[in-house]
């Protein structure tokens, strides 16, 4: 101790300043590092919960089936069984929360989005060329969307 | 030196140590208080990331290029226009030129608007097309992810359940991860100025829902499931029982996105 005090004062000040800065750094790190950082790796584990806290936008088929079980049963028998309700009907979250809120009506362009003929589309898919397939107005005149392999 | 070891000095030091130990719980409480102010969340309870291992499977032969998945992802995750967390590529392989002695011609890849509004007629005339197909792309959820290795601040990481996520609070927007990703799956979000990417719809899968793209896909080109909890007649188990491939296997990234029916031209 006495030897340290015998050191030139500028050196003593420098040493004290360095110790001070290091102390401030460790104190700040102690308070500011989140407790979950480094828990399971070099990241903040709480970020998982934060990312998961977002609200879902699409309701999911299970939510539709809760009320529309009849439609779901019908759908399961047809070619469109792999489709989710929201694939065609659009986001249904608002409707799930408040059934009075109706979903928009669908139009023909939606059918064509999948069924218009294209050389890039796989062979198993039913494809049509709009210009020589039918000159009428709506697909639903001949096709039932929930059971496409049936005649209305 | 010996004059330092007086009774008084030793007692003083001991009192200091005891005082320091007693002060620790107080400091901890104080610390927890500070951190509660800094971060709070309303995550779904009861989800343990160690109990799951997610896998995404993509069947190229099932993709019809409708682009509904791209649209669904954008709406689900507020992906800004001009950026994509998932997109569809159209591969058009031309017939070989007559007399060239080759099995196939040039390969043309396009993805207008990420395939979000479907695909217009290809610029290659039909009679010149040898083969054409769609390839859906998204984050490959690498087991040894190059993007997490380069992050200087620990903002992006491999979650224990297989998702590769970005901690927005920690990301400084340096863009190293965007350059490191060999699949081009990351972008700098122009609104938050942080790295952005597919989260596997983490807020959905933690609630027992499917990711938005999987939910909306009409042809089951996208199959998603948990390897640790196979369900009855699991489509994922059926999928991986057959031959599956990965993108850029030579890089050793170990993607957790399995493809079926990949053409050799797909990069």
Image (cartoon, coloured by chain):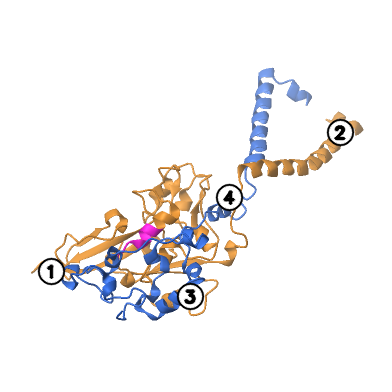
Chain colours: A blue, B orange
Q: Secondary structure at mark 2?
A: helix
Q: Chain of mark 1?
A: B
Question: Observer-nearest residue: B79 or B177?
Answer: B79
Label 1 CA crowd tier, 10 Å (few <14, some 14–19, many 20+): few
For this orientation, the residue located farthest to the top is A9
For this orientation, the residue located farthest to the right is B7
Q: Are marks 3 and 1 on the same chain?
A: no
Labels 3 and 1 touching (C-beta < 8 A): no
Relative to B96, A71 lies left or right: right
For this orientation, the residue located farthest to the front is A100
Q: Secondary structure at mark 3?
A: helix
| Image disc number at residue A69 | 3
Question: Observer-nearest residue: A148 or B210?
Answer: A148
> Is B98 in the magenta?
no
Q: Secondary structure at mark 1?
A: helix
Q: Secondary structure at mark 4?
A: loop
Residue A13: image quadrant is top right
């Amino acid at each position: 101790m006495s030897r340290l005090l015998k050191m030139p004062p500028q050196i003593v000040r420098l040493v004290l300043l360095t110790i001070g800065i290091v102390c401030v750094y460790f104190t700040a790190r102690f308070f500011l590092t989140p407790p979950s950082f480094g828990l399971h790796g070099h990241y903040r584990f709480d970020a998982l919960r934060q990312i998961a806290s977002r609200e879902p936008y699409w309701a999911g088929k299970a939510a539709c089936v809760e009320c529309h079980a009849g439609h779901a049963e019908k759908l399961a028998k047809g070619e469109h069984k792999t489709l989710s309700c929201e694939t065609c009907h659009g986001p249904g979250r608002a409707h799930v929360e408040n059934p009075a809120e109706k979903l928009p009506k669908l139009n023909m362009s939606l059918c064509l989005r999948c069924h218009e003929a294209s050389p890039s589309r796989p062979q198993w898919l039913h494809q049509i060329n709009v210009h020589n397939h039918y000159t009428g107005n709506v697909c639903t005149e001949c096709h039932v969307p929930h059971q496409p392999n049936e005649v209305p | 030196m010996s004059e330092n070891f007086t009774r008084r000095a030793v007692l003083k030091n001991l009192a200091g140590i005891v005082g320091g130990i007693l002060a620790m719980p107080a400091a901890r409480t104080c610390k927890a208080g500070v951190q509660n102010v800094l971060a709070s969340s309303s995550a779904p309870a009861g989800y343990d990331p160690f109990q799951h291992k997610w896998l995404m499977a993509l069947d190229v032969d099932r993709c019809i290029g409708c682009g509904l998945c791209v649209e669904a992802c954008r709406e689900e995750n507020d992906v800004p226009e001009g950026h994509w967390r998932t997109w569809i590529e159209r591969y058009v392989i031309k017939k070989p030129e007559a007399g060239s002695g080759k099995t196939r011609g040039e390969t043309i890849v396009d993805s207008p608007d990420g395939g979000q509004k479907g695909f217009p007629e290809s610029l290659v005339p039909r009679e010149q097309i040898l083969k054409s197909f769609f390839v859906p792309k998204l984050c490959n959820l690498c087991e040894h992810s190059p993007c997490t290795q380069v992050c200087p601040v620990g903002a992006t990481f491999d979650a224990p359940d297989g998702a590769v996520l970005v901690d927005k609070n920690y990301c400084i927007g340096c863009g190293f991860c965007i350059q490191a990703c060999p699949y081009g799956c990351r972008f700098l979000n122009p609104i938050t100025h942080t790295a952005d990417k597919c989260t596997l719809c983490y807020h959905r899968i933690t609630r027992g829902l499917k990711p938005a793209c999987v939910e909306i896909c009409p042809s089951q080109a996208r199959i998603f499931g948990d390897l640790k909890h196979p369900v009855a007649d699991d489509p994922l188990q059926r999928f991986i029982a057959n031959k599956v491939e990965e993108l850029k296997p030579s890089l050793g990234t170990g993607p957790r996105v399995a493809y079926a029916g990949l053409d050799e031209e797909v990069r």
